[in-house]
Image (cartoon, helix red, strand yellow):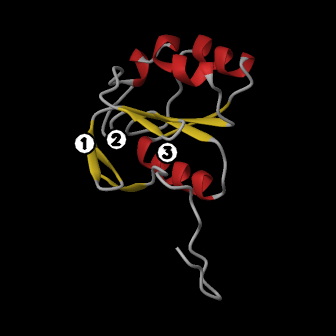
Amino acid sequence: MQQLPGDITPQLPAGSQLFRSYGDDYFQIGDSRYAGSLLIHDNTIVHPWQPQHLNDLTLDHLQAVLANPPEVLLIGSGRRTAFPAMELLDALAAAHIGFECMASKACARTFNLLLVEGRHVSAALMPPASRP
């Protein structure tokens, strides 16, 4: 895509996964709609993804993230901001992976912003209406 003078459209790598919309039971990334939880890591969408509630999230679900750490992992906890088990957060810190926990809809918006900034970001999202 050619940039015109004054054009502030971000230049993203081909295949970048941007959230386009969300509802209480889905996320839309590009032209695809996903119901339930999903993981975005290394520009790959993992769906279906097993944990449906934040309390179900374990280190086993994040093995791909631990194997190739991003700069930051955004954790979308569902309807409201909540935190996963402390052992999971301790393991992320030990692996030098920054993390932020927030409601899933806020997580989708934040993911887009960080991706546009060129950051190496991953996201683990519970369904938007999910409760921990």
**Which element is circle 1 on?**
loop
Residue plotted at (49% across, 45% down): 107
Give the distance between the C-alpha atoms of the residues marked 1 and 2, in whole angstroms: 6 Å
Check disc 3 and report the residue beneath it.
Answer: 107
Check disc 2 and report the residue beneath it.
Answer: 128
Question: Is residue 103 placed above or below 96 in the rendered structure?
Answer: below
Answer whether labels 3 and 2 touch (C-beta < 8 Å).
no
- Could you tell me which quadrant the C terminus lies in? top left
Check disc 1 and report the residue beneath it.
Answer: 25
User: Label 3 sits on what residue type?
Assistant: Cys
Which callout, 3 or 1, points at the residue further toward the start of the chain?
1
Quarter residue 44 falls in: top left
User: Label 1 sits on what residue type?
Assistant: Asp
Give the distance between the C-alpha atoms of the residues marked 3 and 2, in whole angstroms: 10 Å
Which one is nearer the viewer's eye here, 120 or 92? 120
Residue plotted at (61% across, 77% down): 8
Answer whether labels 1 and 2 touch (C-beta < 8 Å).
yes
Residue plotted at (29% across, 56% down): 31
